[in-house]
Image (tube, helix red, strand yellow):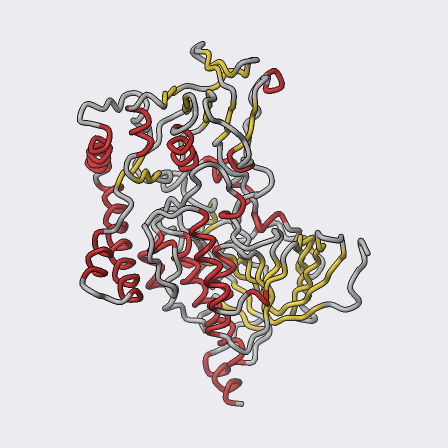
Amino acid sequence: MPNEAQSEATHVDVLIVGAGISGVGSAYHLKEQCPDKSFVILEMKDTFGGTWETHKYPGVRSDSDLYTFGYRFKPWIGAPIASAEEILKYMGEVIEENDIDDNILYGQRITGCSWSSEDSRWTVRAIRLADGAELTFTAGFLWMCQGYYDHENPFVPDWPSMDQYQGMFVHAQLWDPDIDYAGKKVLVIGSGATAATIIPAMAETAGHVTMLQRSPTYFFCSENRNELADRLREIGIDEPTVHRVVRAQITHDQDLMTKRCQTEPDAVFEELKALVRHYAGEDFEFEPHFTPNYRVWQQRLAFCPEGDIFKAAVAGQLSVVTDTLETFTEKGVRTSSGEEIEADIVIAATGFRLSVMGEIPFEVDGEAVDWHETVNYRGMMFTGVPNLAWVFGYFRASWTLRVDILGDFACNLLNHMDKIGARRVDVAMRDEDADMQILPWIEPDNFNPNYLMRDIDRLPQRGDRPEWRHNQDYWREREDIPATDLDGPEFLYDGERRSRDAMQNAAAG
């Protein structure tokens, strides 16, 4: 019956929120490294996939290579840049091969999470969307894998006179695959990874596509293949080894690229231009539409397999307008410079609306949690919030690289708590952190995408020391996080700092 509550709470050792790329990977690590832990995954959608289930616009694909976006424990054997369909198939295989499906409850909207210090457990309230039943779960540990943006309400700027437009308006995140755009004039507003994906896919059959951008974006053009992977396969190397070696090669090259973007950004831009010209021709003009006003990698670098968006421009299928939108009109939009752009379909590729912890209300001992008042520990745990880990990935490297790193960390932490007989773990400032400066989540001159800058005051804060920030540096974290001393002074077990001797005695007893 609708709104019928279950008679008793379902208890598990670990509750994972979300069955997307983070939740599925975390569940694998939990099963492998903590096999005696009971767990459940609560997923709001009717199936797994998260981002790859939400987005259905034409051409939807990864903008990271699958050798690093795929999990370290399951070899990727396809092209480096994969479609949403291929990624969902890969995730489905992970779930099936590791018997994870029995642990997933779909169609569950979480309405609140409350921590009780008296019981050392979380109470999670949810509504089963199929019938409105109210469900309750309790868990010793929460593993938040719900992502970082609102899957139901994308960001749409408050443009003037949108109600006057007589054509079809849709945000790319809410695209319906049944929309017929063949032969239509299409206007795409935005120039990031979504626009870079949707434009070449639509240009093949649309009458014409126009991209309206406030400012240009950097693009990286390359063949959709990995030469090293192809060569290793050719000489008979097994797939797990291919996956491991190619993954190492890609992360090595990305590290060099990231450092060069800071030390010699102009040289990197010239190299990016050369890659574009390889596909678009030596006389391709970059001014004014393809010369960004920020440093390379200060925002995400959009990947273009085979230079497809530039090929569309050269073929006359795509026009680019760099200007601000002044107003909508009956037939399209008018820019600030007075240019009229007519369109049958307007697609907003304007990005995400940030969602902190899935907008779920949290309480600790009856007090509401304001995440902005917390300080993050390595971007995954938070002062004042016990027994909780959050998976937030990388901007300049594949998200999943951090899923694997934090999977190891969380499992090591859970096993350590069992070893010393602790039911609760907190992170807290050390004596040496007493004078630490507290700052916004991330430095704007390091990485400044609009969706973060719009809501930076909703995110947890950081310190100016390595432990108290998400530094966005995979190449450093892959060494630092596995080396974390779980007996260090930043960890409180059962509400107190314990000496190493006391912990060893408790474990022995």
Quarter occupied by the N terminus: bottom right
Residue at horizontal 41%, vertical 71%?
485
**Left or right: 395 as drawn, with respect to 375:** left
**Residue 288, percent from left and from top:** 30, 20
Count of numbered circles on the image: 0
| Front residue of 238 and 379 | 238
**Residue 433, percent from left and from top:** 45, 59
**Left or right: 2 as drawn, with respect to 239:** right
The extreme bottom residue here reads: 509
| Front residue of 277 and 137 | 277
| Front residue of 327 and 72 | 72
The extreme top residue here reads: 338
Q: Residue 362 occupies which quadrant of the picture?
A: bottom right
Quarter occupied by the C terminus: bottom right
**Residue 407, percent from left and from top:** 45, 65
The relative height of residue 51 versus residue 320 in the rendered view (above or below) is below
**Residue 211, percent from left and from top:** 41, 24
The relative height of residue 357 versus residue 290 in the rendered view (above or below) is below
| Front residue of 237 and 214 | 237
Residue at horizontal 43%, vertical 57%?
90
